Image (spheres, helix red, strand yellow):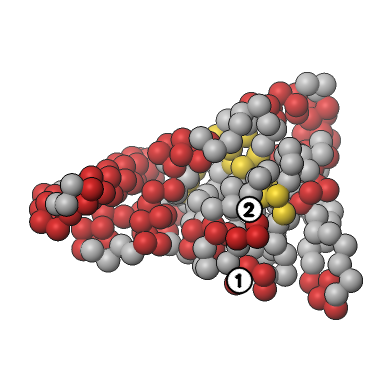
Amino acid sequence: MLYGDDDTLFFMHGVRQLLSKFDHRVPLALTDNIWHADGHPHLSALRCLPCGYNDSSLPTAQTSQPYTPRPACPHCTPHHACPPALTSPQSGSQPECTFSGLGAHGGAGIIFSSALLDQLTANGRVFDCLKRVKGCSGGDCLVSACLWEAGLWYTDPGHSLGHQHPLRHVLFDNAERRKLVKAPMDALVKGTCDDECKDLVRHAVSYHVRASSYSSHAKAVGFMHTLVESHAAGVGFLNLLEDNASTGEAGGAGLAAGREL
């Protein structure tokens, strides 16, 4: 289930690529855009890494963060997401291990596995929770509160943490590189799209349009349609370059294709 705001756009290429790594029979709520303190996405937000994730390979820069998520097996729970007890002087910087009214960012989107939906609705308790919880600022907070109460929590796919600059590689609504996600062809055709850029074009899962900034519903919808086509063209262009490179024709053919596009 793809969950988001009415102006959340999912890139199906990235969605399918991401989901190919997970089992729908495991109760999972996937996102790497989670609130902490007053911001999102935040590297100190409570979350888990996927079961089997090799966290020993995380870049050195990650070890300096006040909180690094841990792999959770078979799936993420509040217990797994909470940091282990620490005795170091820095322990005071660890996130508080309770639900604080924050959770995933609905505009960035969340992906729920069928097993998670089955588990939530099996006894009807989640519906009681949705009716009972008060004071949330939006549906994303409400869903997060009921996930926490049900003993479930968010799994970060871990893609961004595998890089020295993780915020540049967030899959769910990348705030650091919004312009690139919005118009990837500009950088690709000009040849200014580096490896970080190509990684994001290939793996981006969602984009929060923030439709309230548009003067009309029609203009917001028009932009969303254009964004879908632009992103698809970017992925296609990367595929073309790789195909040409594999046959030794990357130089002239790739540039000619870029000019034609």
Give the side of residue 112 with respect to residue 206, left or right. Answer: right
Q: Nearer the viewer, residue 173 or 70?
A: 70
Q: Residue at x 76, y 51 (%)?
A: 81
Q: Nearer the viewer, residue 146 or 77?
A: 77
Give the side of residue 249 with respect to residue 72, left or right. Answer: left
Q: CA distance from mark 1 to mark 2?
A: 14 Å
Report the number of discs. Answer: 2
Residue identified by numbered label 2: 54
Element on which disc 2 rests: loop
Which of the 4 quarters of the picture holds residue 86?
A: bottom right
The amino acid at mark 1 is Thr
The answer to whether residue 207 is above or below residue 221 is below
Q: Residue at x 67, y 70 (%)?
A: 63
Q: Residue at x 66, y 45 (%)?
A: 52
Q: Which mark is residue 71?
A: none
Residue identified by numbered label 1: 60
